[in-house]
Amino acid sequence: MKPKNEKNNLNRKVIINLAYLFGIIILVVATVLLSQNVEQQSKNKGSFTDLVSLIREDKVSEIKLSEVKDTLITKVYQTDKRERNDVKEVIYPNVSQDKSKTVLDNLQLALGDKKLAIGNGEKQIIYSEVPRSWFNQMIESGFIQNILIIGLILGGGIYLLRRVGEANNKTISFGNSKAKQYDEENQTKITFADVAGNEEAKQELNEVVDFLKRPEEYVKMGAKIPKGVLLVGTPGNGKTLMAKAIAGEAEVPFLFVSGSEFVEMFVGVGAGRVRDLFRKAKKKAPCVIFIDEIDAVGRQRGAGMGGGNDEREQTLNQILVELDGFEPSSSVIVIGATNRPDVLDPALLRPGRFDRQVTVTSPDRKEREQILKIHSKNKKLAASADLSIVAKRTAGFSAADLFNVLNEAAILTVREKKSEIDNVILREAVEKVLLGPSLKSKVITEDQKRLTAYHEAGHALVATVLPKSRKVQKVTIIPRGRAAGYTFSDEGENDAITRSRSEFLADIANLFGGYCAEEIVFGETSTGASSDLSKATEIARNMVTKYGMSEGLGPVVFQEEKGMNYLGRDTEYKQYSQDAARIIDQEVSQIVLEGYQICRSVLIQFRDKLDQISSVLIEKEVLEYEDFSELTDDVLDKPFKLLPVPAERTKAMLLKK
């Protein structure tokens, strides 16, 4: 939002330009109308000889004497029609050799023997002297027309000069910063209380706030506060919100700009904008500058395609100088935000510049619930609405994703013509954000329905029996998006940062749930398991190449992610030979086969429960957490025995050594 003074200046400029434009239009219209009036008068002029002839023919009923240029304005009537409504006005100039005589004397001389009869008789001419106003005199003399033309020329010239001046100002100000100031008068003040989660990050940033509130005490103690703070985290987790909260807590001016706004096609413009930005910040000190997506301008130098003298590098050099050069900024703190800290230039991250990095992580279950409470303040939630349900089902969601869930819930509530957002709507909103809208109108055959029911029952049953697996929250066979059905699982009591080999194996076994269920019940598999198999293979390959969880290869990493800065994306480098690749493939197949064996053993030993879950799904189509828990209480974490994998399956899944 633009500051109030900037808005007032903009409105004033618009009003002045509109006033000039309307003034020019009025001058043009007035000039055209007066020109038409003068032209009409010129058409209605007649000669003095014609007037004398009309009087002789007794066709003149009235004569008016004008004061302007000694002319006569006569009203002519036909002889047989003297009604006042048939008036025709004609201007006759008083042409005479003797200028000292009056109009009447000239007429009498011109008429000769036929004297001019003046009076009020039936056939006498009515004579009157009509005084002309000063305005009419100026119009008839052409003075006003000349003034209007001069005014039109001057007005148009001033308008053009103003436009040219504005264009020159824009050219001169091309290097000015495009930073916007956060205006607390027009926007709600944001503090750390409005930022849920990331308590450690807020604690780090509180030191910056304290410095802005009382810088003298830090200077007296000899402490030097960080010049720059880099907020690192995935998109949508509140980096910008935290920067605003710093300014709100410290109650200091807040200038924010995007990193891409510094870069232009002309070399030197970006550096000029950086200088202008810091010049404005120093005038407002203490002040906070927030540069969003700083990786757009702060990428490592020398890695670009434009060489060492391109515009982006010039801009970065100027930022480095402003942060910690010969004239360091006092009481001006720069906050940068990026989700690509690995591509930033090392000079930008050294102490004295962005010397403090604060990681803004994705919220866990408790933090998700706090974020949902903040976003639900302006939503009409039912008294029975439980936000913890949404928090359980949104593992890995960012704060922006959670806002989107509640927004979708509000839209669905209006669509369903309900007065409040209830639990049913909340669950539907989560599923819609994850998978898309439900396809309730799609026609599904009984065979497809039965196949989907067993597929999803297989996933749900394996997840319930295995102690290391994620627990089921919902099972449905209603198609949604590209999925014929789906099984919702949570992330456990706490969203784990690290995971063990047994947990990965449980995930692989869970992914094989639908595949093995189809194989056991129907004797063949369908394409519905393709996505599950792809995920299972990916997990197994990461276990071997990234996490060192294979028995045959040991704790060796065979795959690293290296950023290619000039391309802006990560590329995986394979640092192993062809022989190692063959062994990797064997180890991946071995892990996949192990997960398949676990899944198949569970489904065979709990076949009756698999049939029961499938039957209920075919009947109800949806099993929420409460109904599913009641249905599977007797098998919860129940032990099972590993069964051997059929020989033909082992040969198919394992490569020959």
Image: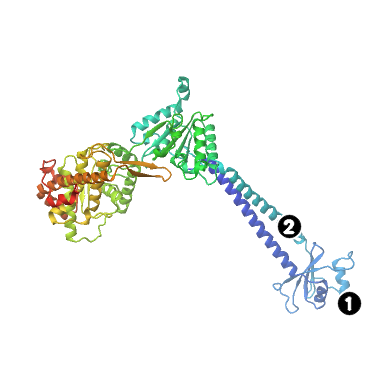
623 sits left or right of 42 in the view? left
Residue 618 location in percent, x, y? 16, 55
Identify which amino acid the numbered label 2 is placed on. Answer: Ile
Q: Nearer the viewer, residue 481 or 196?
A: 481
Q: In the displayed structure, would residue 176 be above or below residue 119?
A: above
- State if disc 2 and disc 1 touch (CB < 8 Å): no
Q: Nearer the viewer, residue 12 or 100?
A: 12
Within 10 Å of disc 2 (Cα), the crowding (few <14, some 14-19, many 20+) is some
Q: Nearer the viewer, residue 19 or 79?
A: 19
The residue labelled by disc 1 is 113
Res. 377 in view? no
394 sits left or right of 90 in the view? left
Q: In the displayed structure, would residue 63 be above or below residue 275?
A: below
Identify which amino acid the numbered label 1 is placed on. Answer: Asp
Does label 1 or label 2 sit earlier along the sequence?
1
Disc 1, SS: loop
Among the 4 quarters of the image, the one containing residue 598: top left
Q: In the displayed structure, would residue 375 be above or below residue 139?
A: above
308 sits left or right of 478 in the view? right
Q: Nearer the viewer, residue 139 or 268?
A: 268
Q: In the displayed structure, would residue 629 be above or below residue 138?
A: above
The residue labelled by disc 2 is 144
Res. 73 in view? yes
Within 10 Å of disc 1 (Cα), the crowding (few <14, some 14-19, many 20+) is few
87 sits left or right of 487 in the view? right
The answer for how far apart the CA atoms under marks 1 and 2 are is 44 Å
Disc 2, SS: helix
